[in-house]
């Protein structure tokens, strides 16, 4: 079953091989070469773990012609020498689990006494690190790439706290020290609860449905729309019933540059991407400001309908030059 579920995880997301497959591999190898080499169950598990994902990706690369999509915008070793890469990674870790829990989980590796457990937990950490280096750009810019760290930190914090409580039971401190520890413990919990509450209270997503559904009606559900918008058009598609063509964000352009791709001249790119489109929708206003050539071109060439949080450039209504 372990091999089957590992194979499913790798099939769905190939990078699961790092944080799922590597710990299992470490456990198998921990028992020695002879033990696993002569055990047919290990070979069956290895086959079930690798065959689905390897087969799918080979077909995708060869028959599907998706080699550049799979490998071209992932691995960027040139980022390893940039401080911004590590700073961005650390910032996203802090936002995901907090430095306190992260450091406790790292310390837990030194507290595990059972060799097999230490090897397994160490492989989880190694898998996360290798995963991050493999997807260096995304691990330092996209917060959802921190998802693999949650089970590692959760397990690590449990190990750390278990060891702390064990030592407190072995060498009971004075009642005043115990009280101080529990006060500190509940204080930290209260601080975290308050921080989470503040984050949730500050964000109100209820107007989202109204905003995007009204935009969809305004544009027309059958209109051809190109958009510089949030979530790669997911909100407009879900609430507004429009599947837009996506204009690249500044992050997309940076990723393209890192992969060695060269885009055509901005004006040429605008003309190519807007060909056959009825509207150019802009809701990612900060990114729009970060692309001054696009902004200037659209404002000087097309009529615009402006609202709270959006621009709609009417591509079928070009302005008369000089007007």
Image (spheres, rainbow, N blue to C red):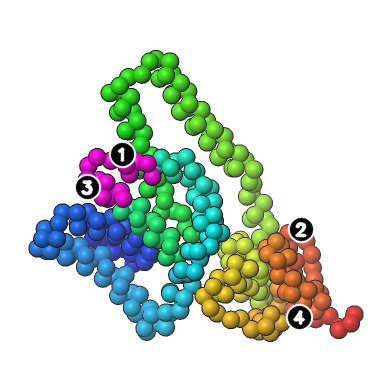
Residue 123 at x, y percent in the picture: 30, 54
| Residue depicted at x 38% and y 64% | 15
Contact between labelled residues 4 and 2, with CB atoms less than 8 Å apart: no
Q: Main secondary structure of the magenta part?
A: helix
- Say what secondary structure mark 2 lies in: loop
Crowd band around label 2 with a 10 angstrom C-alpha radius: few (<14), some (14–19), many (20+): few
Q: CA distance from mark 1 to mark 4?
A: 67 Å
Residue 142 at x, y percent in the picture: 53, 59
Crowd band around label 1 with a 10 angstrom C-alpha radius: few (<14), some (14–19), many (20+): some
Contact between labelled residues 3 and 1, with CB atoms less than 8 Å apart: no
Question: Is residue 106 shown to the viewer in this render?
Answer: yes
Residue picked out by circle 1: 111
In the shown orientation, is residue 169 left or right of residue 301?
left
Residue picked out by circle 2: 308
Identify the mark at residue 116; answer none if there is no mark.
Answer: 3
Find the magenta span and give its range.
Answer: 106-122
Residue closest to the far front: 81
Mark found first going from the N terminus, 2 or 1: 1
In the shown orientation, is residue 62 left or right of residue 203?
left
Crowd band around label 4 with a 10 angstrom C-alpha radius: few (<14), some (14–19), many (20+): few
Image quarter where the C terminus lies is bottom right
Residue 215 falls in which quadrant of the image?
bottom right
Residue picked out by circle 4: 316
For discs 1 and 3, the disc positioned in front in the rendered view:
1
Contact between labelled residues 3 and 4, with CB atoms less than 8 Å apart: no
Q: CA distance from mark 3 to mark 2?
A: 58 Å
């Amino acid at each position: 079953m372990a091999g089957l579920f590992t194979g499913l995880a790798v099939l769905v997301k190939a990078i699961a091989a790092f944080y799922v497959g590597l710990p299992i591999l470490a456990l198998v190898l921990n028992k020695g070469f002879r033990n696993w080499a002569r055990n047919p169950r290990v070979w069956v598990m290895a086959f079930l773990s690798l065959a689905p994902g390897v087969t799918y990706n080979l077909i995708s690369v060869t028959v599907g012609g998706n080699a550049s999509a799979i490998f071209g915008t992932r691995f960027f070793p040139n980022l390893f020498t940039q401080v911004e890469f590590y700073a961005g990674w650390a910032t996203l870790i802090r936002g995901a689990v907090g430095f306190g829990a992260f450091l406790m989980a790292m310390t837990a590796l030194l507290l595990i006494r059972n060799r097999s457990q230490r090897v397994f937990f160490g492989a989880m950490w190694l898998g996360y690190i290798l995963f991050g280096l493999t997807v260096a750009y995304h691990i330092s810019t996209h917060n959802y790439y921190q998802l693999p760290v949650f089970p590692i930190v959760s397990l690590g914090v449990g190990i750390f706290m278990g060891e702390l409580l064990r030592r407190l039971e072995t060498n009971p401190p004075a009642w005043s020290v115990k009280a101080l520890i529990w006060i500190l413990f509940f204080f930290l919990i209260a601080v975290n609860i308050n921080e989470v509450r503040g984050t949730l209270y500050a964000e109100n997503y209820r107007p989202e449905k109204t905003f995007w559904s009204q935009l969809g009606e305004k544009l027309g559900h059958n209109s051809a729309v190109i958009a510089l918008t949030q979530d790669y058009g997911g909100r407009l598609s879900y609430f507004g019933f429009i599947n837009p063509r996506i204009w690249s964000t500044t992050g997309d352009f940076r990723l393209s540059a890192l992969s060695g791709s060269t885009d055509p001249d901005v004006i040429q790119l605008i003309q190519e991407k807007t060909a056959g489109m009825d509207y150019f929708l802009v809701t990612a206003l900060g990114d729009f400001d970060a692309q001054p050539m696009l902004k200037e071109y659209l404002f000087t060439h097309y009529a615009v309908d402006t609202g709270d949080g959006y621009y709609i450039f009417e591509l079928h209504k070009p302005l008369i030059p000089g007007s």
